Amino acid sequence: MQLDHVTIRTGDIDGTRAFFETIFDLTVGERPSAIRRIPGHWLYADGKPIAHIIGSYGSGCDRAAEAIDHVGFRLEGYAAFRARLDRLAIPYSTMDLADIGERRLFLRTPGGPLLEAVFSEPVPPISPEHDHDLQ
C-alpha cells in the first residue's frame, strides 16, 4: 500500500491551486470525465495526480470548513479488498473511472474521516452488481 493522493476542500479553488503550483511545483492535469462535474483541479507531480482540490461552497453556518476532505491509498486486489469489507460489514461506496483504468472504494473510519482505496484495474462492463451506500 502507498499513499495515492490527498483531497483538499476549499472555498478558494484557484488560489489553492496557485499556492500548490508555486510552492510545490505541481502542475494542473487531466481529471476523469466522471468527476468533472465537481469543481476543482488535479495537481500532478512526476506524472501522478497527488493533490486533488475541490470546491467548498455555502455561506454563514452552512459553509463547509476548509479541510483535508479525504486521503487515498493505492492498493492491489480490488475484488479481495471489497470482499473483506463485505465480510466485515463495513459500508462503502464505489466509483469506476474507466477512462483512466481505475476502480475506487470509499469508506469511513470509525471516527468519521473518509478514506479512498484506489486500484489500477480495468473497469469491467456494466453488470447488475449493486453499490453499497456509504453511511
Image: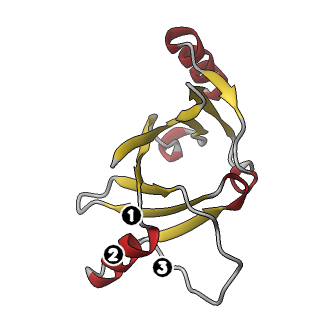
Secondary-structure class at tag 2:
helix
Q: Which mark is residue 107?
A: 1
Disc 1 to disc 2: CB gap under 8 Å: yes
The quadrant the C terminus occupies is bottom left
- Label 3 or label 2, whichever lies nearer to me, is 2
Between 69 and 46, the residue placed more toward the observer is 46
Of the two numbered discs 3 and 1 on the same chain, state the one appearing first in sequence. 1
Direction from residue 107 to residue 120 in the image, left or right: right
Place of residue 36 in the rendered image (x, y in percent of width and height, measured from the top left)? 74, 48
Instruction: For marks 3 and 2, give the CA distance.
Output: 10 Å
Of the two numbered discs 3 and 2 on the same chain, state the one appearing first in sequence. 2
Place of residue 102 in the rendered image (x, y in percent of width and height, measured from the top left)? 59, 57
Mark 2 closeness class: few <14, some 14–19, many ≥20 residues within 10 Å: some
Secondary-structure class at tag 3:
loop
Q: Which mark is residue 132?
A: 3
Q: Which residue is mark 2?
A: 85
Type of amino acid under label 2: Leu
Place of residue 85 in the rendered image (x, y in percent of width and height, measured from the top left)? 33, 75
